[in-house]
Amino acid sequence: MKISPEILNLVPYKPGKPISETQREYGLTTVYKLASNENPLGTSPKAMAAVKLALDHQNLYPDPSHYELLQTLSKEWGFPTKQLAIGNGSDELIDLLTRIYCEPGDGVLTSVAAFNAYEVSAPANRAVIHKIPMKPGYLFDLPAVADYFLSHPEKKIRLIFVSNPNNPTGTFVPKADVESFLEKVGNRDDVMVIFDEAYNEFVRDASYASAQNYISEYKNLIVLRTFSKIYGLAGFRLGAMIAPAEVVEVYNRVRKPFNVNDLAQVAANAAVQDKEFIERSQQICWKGLDYFYKKLEELGLPYIPSQGNFVMFDTLRDAAKVNEALLRRGIIMRPLLNYGFKTHLRLSVGLEHENEAALKALAEVLKEVPLLS
């Protein structure tokens, strides 16, 4: 049977290398994975306690309305439940929004080196991806994004994705730029603007502002969140959306009735209320980033100050060779060739001993792999 060219030409998302695979491939017992921006503290103790209590009724279907979780999110985030929706990871939200708003041939607009999921979801839903170059400093160029959208009506762009802070660069769009951008493209009937704020809780820069602050002003604005990072629930697969009620209503028509399992709902409900765990997660992230900056400077490696729980840095060498040498030492970082970066790696913050092991191994590898001329 014939398969559409959009599907055949689709480049699948490549996740970080698992610990078990690295152990098997290199014959290692100790491996530190600092590649996927996971929470090094694990999962909230309150979430794990709630999950254990819920194990006894897993013969029952999960709540299709996500009632308890939505009530908690409404209280914590300050939005009515009719403006909140839950997905099986933010990946499902991205995919279904693309399906909802894009006809075949319509456009999806984002930046070069933005989160790869947009580039996967667009062709999978027969849409066309358009990418705007970044500004110097690996920054989202929101004025250029707005100009491209406004000057190319023939592209039929229906979705604009802004990853803020952005993965893998760790850069962000400051409040003033967000406001200027929304003034240009907000409240239109022909495009939805989606701010993906997976790393929102790790931001330290005072000039940042969440796009959720503008939801009430713009009828075409959507904000995405994840429970995989600050809450340590990556294995449960859970994402959330803050949006106008009309958007949530349509989304709930399209999603599967049991898209989020019971244990994920229970875990998230407890995790968002575990303030102590959230604060500890922030502190270990910020301390780890400062450590990375110091060590990378000592090694003479350029890096990008990050508002996520990771840092992207330039090895000044063939990153594939550096990565291979690190793997042989039991250190998993993230190569970024699929984002167009041939000499860069992304390093997630781990526990203190993991961070130290990673930078020690990196220092050794830099002596082995020659600089690019």
Image (spheres, rainbow, N blue to C red):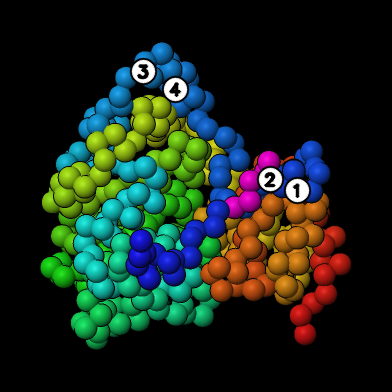
Q: Is residue 18 above or below residue 220?
A: above
Residue that label 1 marks: 25
Question: What is the chief secondary structure element of the magenta stretch?
Answer: loop
Residue 65, numbered circle: none
Residue position marked by numbered label 2 in the rendering? 21
Q: Which of 313/209 is in front?
A: 313
Q: Residues within 10 Å of mark 2 (few under 14, many from 20)?
A: few
Give SS at disc 3: loop
Residues at marks 4 and 1, CA–CA distance in whole angstroms:
33 Å
Report if the CB atoms under discs 1 and 2 are less than 8 Å apart.
yes
Which of the two marks, 2 or 4, is nearer to us in this view?
2
Disc 2 element: helix
Q: Identify the residue shown where x is 72% and y is 47%.
A: 22
Q: Point out the tag, 4 or 1, that comes first from the N-terminus.
A: 1
Disc 3 target residue? 59
Q: Earlier in the sequence, mark 3 or mark 2?
A: 2
Q: Residue at x 25, y 44 (%)?
A: 255
Residue 368, quarter of picture: bottom right
At which x and y percent is residue 155?
Answer: 25, 80
- Estimate the spatial distance between the alpha carbons at disc 2 and disc 4, rounded to whole Å: 28 Å
In the rendered structure, which amino acid carries the disc numbered 2? Glu
Pick the front one: 163 or 302: 163
Question: Mark 4 highlights which residue?
Answer: 51
Disc 3 + disc 2, Cβ < 8 Å: no
Q: Is residue 17 magenta?
A: yes
Q: Nearer the viewer, mark 3 or mark 4?
A: 3
Neighbour class for label 3 at 10 Å: few (<14), some, many (≥20)?
A: few
